[in-house]
Image (cartoon, helix red, strand yellow):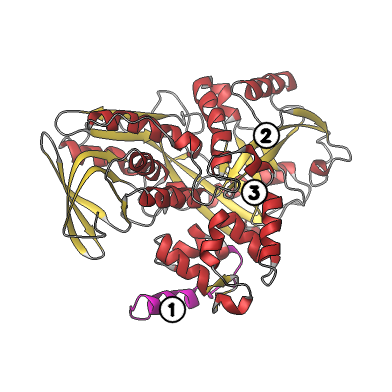
Amino acid sequence: MADNPKRIDCDVLVVGGGINGAGIARDASGRGLRVLLCEKDDLAQHTSSASSKLIHGGLRYLEQYHFGLVRKALAEREVLLKSGPHIMHPLRFIMPHTAGQRPAWLIRMGLFLYDHLARRDFLPGSEALSLQGHPAGAPLQPRFARAFAYSDAWVDDARLVVLAAVDARERGANVLTRTRCTGLAREPQRWIATLQGPDGELRVHARCLVNAAGPWAAGFLGTATGKPGAARPLRLVKGSHIVLPRLFEHDSAYILQQPDGRIVFAIPYEGRFTLVGTTDIDYQGDLDRVAIDAAEIDYLCAAVNRAFAQPVAPNDVVWTYAGVRPLIGEEGATASSASRDYRLETNLDGAPLLSVFGGKVTTFRKLAEQAVDWIAPALGRRVPGWTDKACLPGGDLFGRQPSARSVLEFEAWTRTRQQQYAGLAPALVARYARAYGTRLGAMLGHRRSRADLGEEIVPGLFEVEADWLVKQEWAQTADDILWRRTKLGLHIPPGTERRLEIWLAARRGLPLPAA
């Protein structure tokens, strides 16, 4: 398919460039379908970059009897780890325990289920800990004498979306960011869609439409079917996070039980920081302007102060983010207990239509597989799923097949890259390895010294990387690069992002941005 003609014919038009849209575009492209994905903003700009950055079964969902969701998520956990060992890694969780919290027998039973609901190939099982003399006990208040530990995993959520989109493009998909679907007409055998992007209007003829618009999905379904309000409404729940200076030195995370029955995570983040979240609040505001509020910051700081010896206050917060999760509505459920499972709704009243409701990062691959299992036969193409045996771009450390070895030996693989690029700072090579995996070689080419990397646009960001992100990963703005493709926004001095804005404008031949 051409990059951006006035008209494109395709098999599948995917509307929405979050994790589910990118995952479906990837899976469908790999099955030989002609795919176009459009996203009105940047990839992962909204909900999919505002998660807790976890690949997990959801231990707390066991209390709500969501055993099917937990089993499905646990099964996916190691599949994903093996496919993207650069942007994901195992993470040990510590649950401090004291009187007044969930009883120890209940936690043991829950952890036993968590260990055994799905097969574990290499993640260690749960255990009880004495915190006296244990590194996990050092930053906690003395009242915590014991804890429980279990395994889950961490993910760079925004990079996961981008890499899924990269994989889709390399398998033939056309990915258009900052391109809004402004009109739809349905015929018996095709959809006629009008897209509005940076280069003007585009007409798309698609045999199938996928509505993966996340929080906007219910409204978009009404537009697609011509029946506004016909879709069962989604429950929109805001989840907010704060980033604090590092609260502890070790590399495990904490799961903190709260008096209201909710849990809050405290997760090592970007070396110098701790990520704390999340809140769960019903949301009815502007979906394009989601932000944490003062009460949420107070709630998360209070959660930290109930557990850690060193108190924190709102003025210690160095960064915040918030996203709206589109959850499947349940009668009587609270915002925190509403199901994180997904629902795929199909419609054959004309050309095929599939809408995605709900979901979570951990189950994106399975969701996409099930979606394309319906789409492909509907379009006359019966090709089995393939993504459970495929690496994400850069994840093929030791061959094309996903492997536990890639997860277990990632640090050793990184040390080899540091030796290979001995003229570059080891920390820089380690960051490149985490972000790009095996593709760091394609990005760096024959560059072996700092001088080879070009101008240091902002601290830690050299021209070679910025150019790669623009050419290969759809980055157009400073925020795209500093907060989604990388997390360098946390590490640079305030105000220096303007240097990147000026560089990007010059590279794209645009007027300099206003100061």
Decide: few, some or many residues near mark 2? Use Cα within 10 Å; few <14, some 14-19, many ≥20. many
Q: Nearer the viewer, residue 183 or 398?
A: 398
**Among the two numbered marks 2 and 1 on one chain, the one whose residue lies closer to the N terminus:** 2
**Among the two numbered marks 1 and 3 on one chain, the one whose residue lies closer to the N terminus:** 3
Decide: few, some or many residues near mark 3? Use Cα within 10 Å; few <14, some 14-19, many ≥20. many
**Which quadrant is home to the N terminus?**
bottom left
Q: Is residue 143 left or right of residue 156?
A: right
Q: Is residue 410 left or right of residue 84?
A: right
* Vertical placement of residue 261 versus 397, above or below: above
How many marks the image carries: the answer is: 3
- Looking at the rendering, the stretch of residues picked out in magenta corresponds to 490-515
Which numbered dot is residue 372? none
Q: Is residue 154 left or right of residue 507?
A: right
Q: Which residue is mark 3?
A: 301
Q: Disc 2 vs disc 3: which is toward the camera?
A: 2
**Which quadrant is home to the C terminus?**
bottom left
Q: Is residue 318 visible?
A: no
Is 494 contained in the magenta span? Answer: yes
Gap in angstroms between the C-alphas marked 1 and 3 = 37 Å
Q: Is residue 83 visible?
A: yes
* Vertical placement of residue 334 versus 195, above or below: above
| Element carrying mark 2 | strand
Amino acid on which disc 2 is placed: Ser
Q: Looking at this rendering, what residue extends furthest in the left direction?
A: 187
Which numbered dot is residue 502? 1
Do labels 2 and 3 touch, CB within 8 Å?
A: no
Q: Which residue is mark 2?
A: 151
Amino acid on which disc 1 is placed: Ile
Q: Looking at this rendering, what residue extends furthest in the right direction?
A: 133
Q: Position of residue 316 (x, y in %)?
A: 66, 59
Q: Nearer the viewer, residue 248 or 10?
A: 10
